[in-house]
Amino acid sequence: MTESFRSLIDQRAVEVPDRIFLVDPDSAHQMSYLELKENTARFGNMLNQLGVSSASNIGFLMDNGYWTVIVMLGTMYHGSITVPLNAVASRRNLKFAVENGKLDLIFVSTIHRSLLDKVLSDIDRSILVIEVDMEHGFDLKFLNLSTECESDIELTKDTPAMILHTSGTVGVPKGAVLSHGNLIAGGKNVVLAQNLKEDDIAFCILPLYHINGQVVTVVAQLVSSSQVVMPRKFSLSRFWSTLTDNRCTWFSTVPTITKYLLDDVHAKEGEQNLRDTSCLRFARSASSAMPASMLVDFEETFGIPMLESMGLTESAAPILANPMPPATRKPGSVGIPFGNKVKIIDHSGGDLGHGEIGEIVVSGSNVILEYYNAREATESAFTPEGWFRTGDLGYQDDDGYFFVTGRIKELIIKGGENISPREIDDVLYRNKAILEVATFGYPDPAYGQVVAIAVVLKADQSYSEEELMEYCRTELGSFLCPSRIFFVDDLPKGPSGKIQRLQVAKSLIPDD
């Protein structure tokens, strides 16, 4: 039975022991399926030696790579719960993830150690930290540990495996609890949608602190007994050489990265210098909507199909996807369900017909157990019938394809990452020169949306745009820092005095 990562990894080690599971091109490390089983068992036994019991919550703050995969899968193999920490999150959100996740131990790569130390300095609790050399991994004694699992904890499909913190659909950080069964079901859905085979080789360029990187390009390969090539980070200059050198057959991307790839090629006037890309079967896009024109441009430029899809942290990645050729693909659509059920409901929970816009809801074995330590948030996230509310508005056409028309909430989606406007508002309100502020998403061709703010200064204050931008860079970090600042005399408000954020955006974003 493959109900857990332990049973799945053990099964693959017996079935295909010598097949390569992982290639890390930055360190030249590679790992067979037998070595995956041995390394995850060693990792669990190392946790035992450290006194870390099964069912502990273990975080990692690391870039992608050989050792990161061992930490992530090894934690779950041991029976503990892995808690990925987002390297580009605000310091406040990182602190929330560490505290809310009740972490007992954190693995951190050298490059992120100073960031973690700053976060932990604000936490009044001792947490064990192990720094990982991304080239050489753990202490050499690691290799002397037993390659047999020394845990007597039985794992089932309902055993919690991961807590992944997300801003969610209401703009408040929450920890989505994903079980072994949820994550494996998510991987199976990818395999089903993309018709993955044993000889496929995925190119993983999305971070392992994101559900897409975790499930679409790691778990799905484990489910399909195939291979993943995983550099530390996305690199535009090395993208095609790494892909073709390793004969990758597909990759998962987001519109921001797709835009970088297209701009790079077009800037070279079609001189792609892509080597022999005949190995590629398709590309897959998720995280935020891809403009239909970009999809067509990609397919015409690179000569492979781009399969747009839709997934959530709470659904272990995919819920909808455009099918593989020769089946119909519709530009602008996020596709059809694979492995779960999806429908459209109205505000009272009633089912809507084809062409009618409502909320997209999903049901399936891939959907989360709960939000960690958040009973009310869990209850409100599901309909009385047990369907998960995605927070997205959309409709289903007569052919069964789904289209997303907008979001119920006011989240900003920058490069596929959710940003809560209120999070930025709260930081800016600490500035004594600011009277009122409203953060909103501003259209951007590369990121989909970037952060913009509308600011009302106090009457006795003066503040230049550069001064405010410097304040934002310092307090928010580069990813959350606004790209556009608008100084205004007043902000629109409702009857209760609440600032109407959508009206702010409407008044400041020019009509096309």
Image: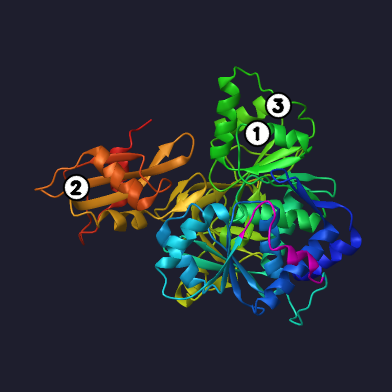
Question: Label 2: which residue?
Answer: 456
Tell me where residue 298 sits by quadrant: top right
Q: Is residue 47 on the magenta stretch?
A: no
Question: Label 1: which residue?
Answer: 238
Please tell me whether residue 349 is drawn above or below residue 311 in the rendered image: below
In this figure, which colouring scheme has been used for the structure? rainbow
Q: Amino acid at mark 1?
A: Arg
Tag 3 secondary structure: loop
| On-image quarter of the N terminus | bottom right
Q: Where residue 274 is drawn, which disc sits there? A: 3
Q: CA distance from mark 3 to mark 2?
A: 50 Å
Q: Please state if 377 lies on the left or on the right of 433 as rendered.
A: right
Q: Amino acid at mark 3?
A: Leu
Q: Is residue 339 visible?
A: no
Q: CA distance from mark 1 to mark 2?
A: 44 Å
Tag 1 secondary structure: loop
Marked residue nearer the N-terminal end (1 or 2): 1
Q: Amino acid at mark 2?
A: Val
Marked residue nearer the N-terminal end (3 or 2): 3
Residue sitting at the far front: 140
In this view, the residue in front, 147 or 241, is 147
Tag 2 secondary structure: strand
Tell me where residue 189 sits by quadrant: bottom right
Circle 3 or circle 1, nearest the eye: 1
- The magenta-colored residue range is 132-146
Q: Position of residue 364 (x, y in %)?
A: 66, 65
